[in-house]
Image (cartoon, grey):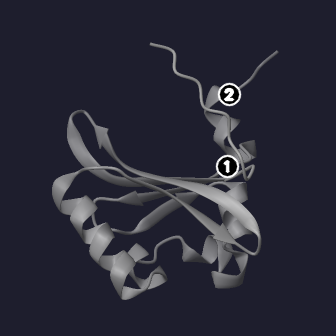
Amino acid sequence: MNYNYGDWIKGCPAAVTICDENKIIVEMNDAAAEMFQKDGGRDLISSNIQDCHPQKAQEIISKMYEDHQPYIYSITKNGRKKMVYQTPWFRDGKFGGILEILFETPSEVPHFDRD
């Protein structure tokens, strides 16, 4: 079977959005385009991520770009709980921007200590 392993992200059920070092959205998978359809979907590519967020979120994003530290949180919207994982990504050791992975979770998530 001839398979391009780089294509896995297209069909991934988590919404994945990639921004470059200048806060510009450079890529979205199908789930992200669908999730943000009312905001423009794939038309958001080439726009500044700051323009998609309220002031408080803009401050958090700016800090992530300065400190290169991840920001992880959960939200409930329209009765659905989602986990948001925003993290810097690097290419050849150089800061490349921010990657966001957003996925729905059940209201109760099992937790296991595996020390």
Residue at x 31% of width, y 70% of height: 60
Residue type at mark 1 is Ala
Residue placed under numbered mark 1 in the picture: 14
Q: Quadrant of the N terminus?
A: top right
Seen at 68% across and 41% down, the residue is: 109
- Total of numbered circles in the picture? 2
On the rendered image, what quadrant is the C terminus found in? top left
Whether residues under marks 2 and 1 lie with C-beta atoms below 8 angstroms apart, the answer is: no
Q: Regarding mark 2 in the picture, which secondary structure is present there?
A: loop
Which residue is nearer to you in this view: 6 or 107? 107
Residue type, mark 2 in image = Asn
Would residue 68 be found to the left or right of residue 42 on screen?
A: left
- Closer to us: 48 or 4: 48
Dot in front, 2 or 1: 1
For residue 65, above or below residue 53:
above
Whole-percent x, y for residue 82 in the image? 64, 58
- Residue shown at the point (46%, 66%) measured from the top left: 25
Find residue 4 and name its label: 2
Q: CA distance from mark 2 to mark 1?
A: 19 Å
